[in-house]
Image (cartoon, rainbow, N blue to C red):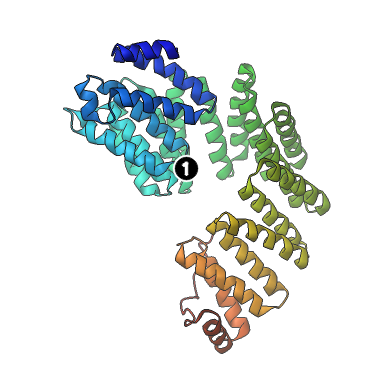
Amino acid sequence: LTQALGLALESEQWDNAQLLVQPLAQVYHMQKRFAELRRLRGQILDIVGQTSEEAIAKNAVELWLYLLGTEASEAVDLHDLEYADNLNNELLQYLESQPEGDSDPRTAAVYHQFGQVARQRWQLDEAVEWFEKSLAIVQDSEDPSAASDDFFALAQVKQNQRYYTEAKELYQKALDIHQRLPDEESMVNDYRALGTVCQLKFEYEEAANWLNRARAIVEEQRDEETAILIFHQMGTVAHAQYFFDDAISWYQQALQLSDRLGNQHQMAVEFHHLGLLHQTRGIVYEEAEEWYLTALDQWNKIGDKRSAGDECRQIGVLFHEQEKYEEADKWYREASGIFEEIADVPRLARTYGQLSMIAESQDNITDALEWATRTYDLAVNHNLSVIIQVKSHLSRLRDTYGHENFNSWWLDFTGTEAPEDLDVDTSKII
């Protein structure tokens, strides 16, 4: 393929070159050889032209559009959002300059990519606008799969916004298209998404039904990697209903299959959920601790510091629930050290908040104030969603310590006047 591609490019047979690069790119993508794939695209762009003007001059603009479009899509998948934005802006500038460009399905594809970028940045209203612009072009086109992509993406945004009924309706629209095609791989994704949103709506029986439909397909296709994810989801549905033995069975099936396939990351996930299950049971906390420590060891082995920090914090929560405050404090500090190292501000803020709660439980008000003030500072400076919780906590500490003592302590610790807007409505805290 590589040799044939080289010959096609050398003889400027651009259509043939595109036909050859597509399966080659698919192989690289499946093997996660993203750096090599990006180099290959770069080498081809050096030949056909880096800009639309250069590609037009060589009559190679269709190949240029394909290369930039797939590069942009991959950049979104790899969370390289600024690079994706730059590529999509180049594509959109060219497409909108063409006759009927505003109704071109390729323009819709760029709108869709902008929507994915906005969703990853948690700009959810903007993401909806982009997906709806894309859908307006492709909904009645000859390619129903493009519309299904928009329905599915819109459903994900609605789910993120906690509009679960709307999300469910949109997932079903995507499913209707995939069933008509038929596209079993996409149907599995739809079934799993419907299972998730039904679980969020506490419709557990329906959630299990959707997941069983997905399981039937992947077992027939012998798709073991997806089967792991479905087994895990079945476990969470049983777990949510306190069907602990069923949940353990599903988690263990996911764990055993992950072990056989060498999926180290998913093994850690199953260890963690087995810990959560035993913690929820509240009978033998030592078993929960053992599972969490096994998960922590696994995260450390694969070098996932963020997940290791989460595991340390969860062990802190386990001891906190048992009012073993010294052990909880130790694990929360371990977690905060990791989050400081990797500069994960939201997780750091929440962990500082938990350290404050521990100090408060031990009647150490000044330590509690110090940790809560650190949380407040992070929440204000980084516009974090925990701001309502930390204001409520500071308000409680202020009332315990006394307003004058609180104001004096705040001035000494921060060099600024204490905030006066700490009395907040906590009814909307989720």
Q: Tell me if mark 1 has few (under 14), some (14-19) or many (20+) residues whose alpha carbon lies within 10 angstroms of its own.
A: some
Q: Which kind of residue does numbered mark 1 sit on? A: Thr
Q: Position of residue 417 (x, y in %)?
A: 47, 83
Q: Position of residue 380 (x, y in %)?
A: 46, 67
Q: Nearer the viewer, residue 52 or 116?
A: 52
Between 410 and 235, the one nearer to me in the picture: 410
Instruction: Give percent across and percent down for residue 99.
Output: 16, 27
- In the image, residue 12 above or below residue 145: above
**Image quadrant for the C terminus?**
bottom right
Tell me if 188 is positioned left or right of 91 in this view: right
Q: Is residue 124 left or right of residue 47?
A: right
Residue at screen point 32% across, 43% down = 129
Q: Please tell me in which quadrant of the rendered image residue 55 appears.
A: top left
Task: Return the x and y of residue 426 as percentages of the image width and height.
Answer: 52, 67
Residue 132: quarter of image: top left
User: Looking at the picture, does residue 330 appear above or below residue 7?
Assistant: below
Q: Which residue is mark 1?
A: 165
Secondary-structure class at tag 1: helix
Residue 209 is left or right of residue 297, and the answer is left
Q: Nearer the viewer, residue 212 or 400?
A: 400
Query: Is residue 247 shown to the viewer in this render?
Result: yes
Left or right: 423 with respect to 300?
left
